[in-house]
Structure formats: structure tokens, C-alpha cells
Amino acid sequence: MVRTLLVRGLLLGLLAGLIAGGFAFAFGEPGVDSAIALEEAHAAQEAPGHDHGEEALVSRPGQKAGLFLAMGLYGLAVGGIFALVYAGLRGRVGPRSDGGLALAAAGTAFVAVILVPFVKYPANPPAVGDPETIDSRTVLYVVTILVGLAATAIAVATARRVTAGPWARWGAAVAAFLVPVIAAWTLLPAVDEVPDGFPATLLWQFRLASLGTQLVFWAAFGVLFGWACDRAARRAAGVPATAGSPG
């Protein structure tokens, strides 16, 4: 069963990654092009007569093609990990239906791994960020991911201990999640390296496109994985795959 789930996660993760790559190409790449143009214009002002376009190791068309490769590999990795976690959760926590559990797990993963770090350290386009601080910024970002995962585990454990009713259980779980997350947002140092004069509209368009890409990935993957799990469960129970459909 675990092997089947793993293969399913890998294939559907790849598909969801390509779907998200299409979204990023359509909505994120124009902002990247604009940010690169600003960076080159700023560099040209500092060093007139120097052709900064020759410094790029990979051309922009190559980078755009590589976007789909990167998102596909991302989907493969995330899909495999998700499938293993799903196998451990199945029948133990969350909704009883396979599809419901997949959607709930995908939504929880998006909040814990994507949304929690994004609120504190949102993505920045090219020309934003000091190259000398990339290591420290990476460490801080990873720390927020770990906080989100730990908060999720605490919330699940809290929900399982509360027996008063669904509203009390959900309320306790949300509180248990938010307490460590808000503490981390408050205590971790802020990072503000946006240069003066950088267009605020372009900055937030890039950030929203970045968040939207992840939202599209997790939504697509959750729906696809949940649909595949429900379909497999119906087949295992001897119910035709078209059962319940009109006509």
C-alpha cells in the first residue's frame, strides 16, 4: 500500500508541479522580467558603458524553461514526502474518507510550510536582498518552516486530547497552532532589504504570484491525490468508478 501511495504521490506531484509552473510562468515571470530590467538599469547607472546582459550564466529563455523543470522536480519531491506522511496519517487522524484526508493534509501543509514563513519572510524578486545575508535569511526561513510543522503537530495532539465537542476541539487546535506561530513571528528578527525607490506594486505583484504558485500547487495536488485515493478505495470495495455519476 505504501509503495502504491508513493508512486501516486510522485506522479501527481509532478503533474501538480507542472500546473503550478504554468501559473508561475503566466503571472510571475513578467514581474521577474521587470525586476531584472530595474536591476540592469541601476547597474548601468553605476557603471556606464558596461554590458551587464553578458553576466547572466543562463539566458532568460533558458531560465523560463527551467522554471517548469524546477517545479516538476519540486512536485516529485513534495509528492513523495506527502505520500509517506499520508500513509502514516491514514486511519489515525483527520477525516475518515481518503479524499477528505488528502485535502485536509494538503491544506495543512500549505499553511504550515508555505503560509507561516511567507507572512514573516515574503519572497522577493531579483534586485531585492543583500547577497551577503542570503545564508542568514535562509536559516531564518527554515526556522519558520520548522515552527509551522511543530505548531501543526501540537495542534493535532491537542485536538486528539479534547473530547468536549467539535467546536471545542477545533478551537483548542487553532489556539495551539497560533501560539507558537505568533511567538515566532514576534521574536524572530525582521528582514527588510528592499532598496529605496523599488516599485511597491511590482514587489507585491511578485510576492502574490509567488504565494499563488504555491497555492495552485497544493490545491491541484490535494484535489488530484484525493481523487485518486477515493477512486482506488472505491475499486478496492468493488464499487464501479462511475458510481454516483449522472446517467
Image (cartoon, rainbow, N blue to C red):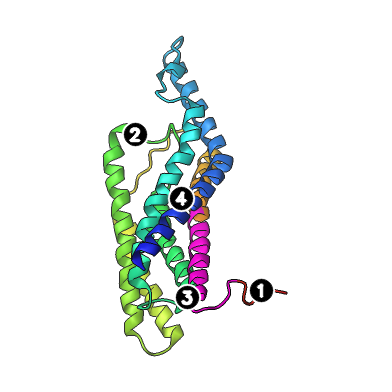
- In front: label 4 or label 2: 4
Q: CA distance from mark 3 to mark 1?
A: 18 Å
Magenta segment boundaries in residue numbering: 217-241
Reading the chain from its start, which is encountered first: label 4 or label 1? Answer: 4
From the viewer's side, name the closer residue of 80 and 24.
80
From the viewer's side, name the closer residue of 137 and 7.
7
Reading the chain from its start, which is encountered first: label 3 or label 2? Answer: 2
Where is mark 1, residue-wise?
245
Where is mark 3, residue-wise?
236
Q: CA distance from mark 3 to mark 2?
A: 55 Å
Q: Bin the neighbour count of mark 2 within 10 Å (Cα to Cα): few under 14, some 14-19, many 20 and up.
A: few
Reading the chain from its start, which is encountered first: label 4 or label 2? Answer: 4
Magenta span main SS: helix
Give the left or right position of residue 220, taking residue 151 as reference.
right
Where is mark 4, residue-wise?
14
Reading the chain from its start, which is encountered first: label 3 or label 1? Answer: 3
- In front: label 3 or label 4: 3
Badge 2 amino acid: Asp
Where is mark 2, residue-wise?
130
Question: Is 166 drawn above or below residue 232 in the view shown?
Answer: below
Q: Are marks 3 and 4 in contact (CB under 8 Å)?
A: no
Q: Residue 54, image x and y in percent?
A: 43, 16
Question: Is 131 drawn above or below residue 214 in the view shown?
Answer: above
Give the left or right position of residue 148, taking residue 206 as reference.
left
What is the secondary structure assignment of the residue under circle 3? helix
- Quadrant location, the N terminus: bottom left
Q: Are marks 1 and 2 in contact (CB under 8 Å)?
A: no
Residue at x 32%, y 67% (from the top left corner): 151
What is the secondary structure assignment of the residue under circle 4? helix
Question: Is 145 drawn above or below residue 33 in the view shown?
Answer: below
Q: Are marks 4 and 1 in contact (CB under 8 Å)?
A: no
